[in-house]
Image (cartoon, rainbow, N blue to C red):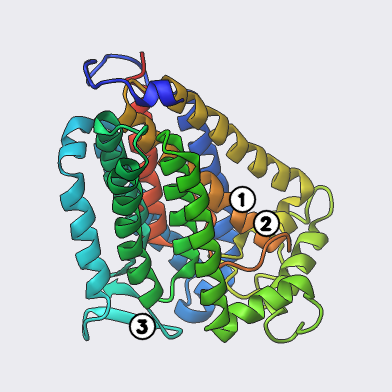
Amino acid sequence: MSKSLARQEKRPNNLSHKPDYFLAGTVVFVLAIGILILSSVSAAISYERFGNTYYYLKHQLLFALLPGIALGLVAYLIDLRFLKKWSLFLFLGNLVLMAMVFLPGIGVKLGGAHRWLNLGFTSFQPSEFLKLSFIVYLASLLGNWQEGASRRNAGKSVKEFLLPFLIVFFVVAAFLCLQKDVSTLIIIFLIAATMFFSSSTPIWHTLVLALIAGLGLVLLVKFEPYRLARVLVFFNNSANSMAEGYQLNQALISIGSGGISGIGLGMSRQRFGFLPEAMSDAIFPILAEETGFIGSIILIFLFLAFLVRGFRIIIKASNGFLQLVAIGVTVWIVSQAFINIAAMLGILPIAGIPLPFISYGGSALVSELIGIGLLLNISKQTI
């Protein structure tokens, strides 16, 4: 992979190659599953709150799916050299939006966290788009650093690679910690670390990052009781079955109720207020309950197929910047999907991470579809 990343950007950027239709089809299939499951899980709460069983589904279609498809098409058609040129401004603009969530009257505080902006007709979560702008900006930085840096000089490698990377990452981490959004921080770290490692930086740099991440995670858990409670529940989920462990226990009940083939679409019992966050972070247990082991395995294999096609695009990318963007988007979608599923199965602590293309949430779906547009854009330019 290091040879591919070292290629100079001398190849034409607008090639008339076809995009990866298999990848696009995989995403469409997952989106269809998401619409079906959301229509089921949101019906009861929509009727309870608005007297309309399709309120949340319509909101997701109108304010998430349609804008996401439109912006994803723009990302598919855009000249990626232009995107690289303006990556810093996109990233800084996103940080400004991250700061605006703390402004009275504009920012929205829910559950003690400042994460949303009030747009009047809907809300907006800048941290979801931070994943995307950070990927593009970091790809630009790493690509430029790799082209001009000499890794044989240890002091120079620290100055040109490790320190700039840590500065950018700590800025992002500071914003996310202030918003109490450690789940997004974990995803962004996985993305950043993978992109950094893939840029052929010295291996000891990656070890330093891993050490810093481990210490940071310990401190974040230690100074926030609810995070510590989640870790303790992970090791003994039956200890607080009616408190911190309630969501996990209800999720496991839901998954177990599905059996092999599920109890049928629209037949979930857990969606009637028993499973917290059933429309968003905990939507996978509803899918497992209604479609069973078969439906769950199909969804997991679809994300594995996404990983394989993403890796194929990474390998064939025509220059370092495109390859790094492809790495970032692929790691983002796949890691978020499997962390969400693993948390609902009790394999990892509850993380509060939405399931890509499935969970309810406009900002998440729009940003994910823009990321897919970029990935398909890169796929049509491979030679």
Q: Nearer the viewer, residue 288 or 76?
A: 76
State the separation of the CA atoms marked 3 and 2. Answer: 28 Å
At 39% from the left edge and 21% from the top edge, which residue is drawn? 4
In the picture, measured across the screen, residue 167 lies left or right of residue 347, that is left
x, y (%) of residue 262?
A: 78, 53
Q: Nearer the viewer, residue 28 or 230?
A: 230
When the figure is inspected, residue 297 is found, relative to residue 313, above or below; the finding is below
Q: Residues within 10 Å of mark 1 (few under 14, many from 20)?
A: some
Which mark identifies residue 338? 1
State the separation of the CA atoms marked 3 and 1. Answer: 28 Å
Q: Which residue is mark 3?
A: 109
At 72% from the left edge and 55% from the top edge, which residue is drawn? 288
The answer to whether any part of residue 305 appears in the image is yes
- Whichever of labels 3 and 1 marks the residue nearer the N terminus, that label is 3
x, y (%) of residue 242?
A: 74, 86
When the figure is inspected, residue 300 is found, relative to residue 58, above or below; the finding is above
* SS under mark 1: helix
Amino acid type of the residue that numbered disc 1 sits on in the rendered structure: Phe
- Whichever of labels 3 and 2 marks the residue nearer the N terminus, that label is 3
Q: Which residue is mark 2?
A: 342
In which quarter of the view is residue 171 placed?
bottom left
Q: Residues within 10 Å of mark 2 (few under 14, many from 20)?
A: some
When the figure is inspected, residue 152 is found, relative to residue 257, above or below; the finding is above
Amino acid type of the residue that numbered disc 3 sits on in the rendered structure: Lys
The answer to whether any part of residue 34 appears in the image is no
Q: Is the C-beta separation of discs 1 and 2 under 8 Å?
A: yes
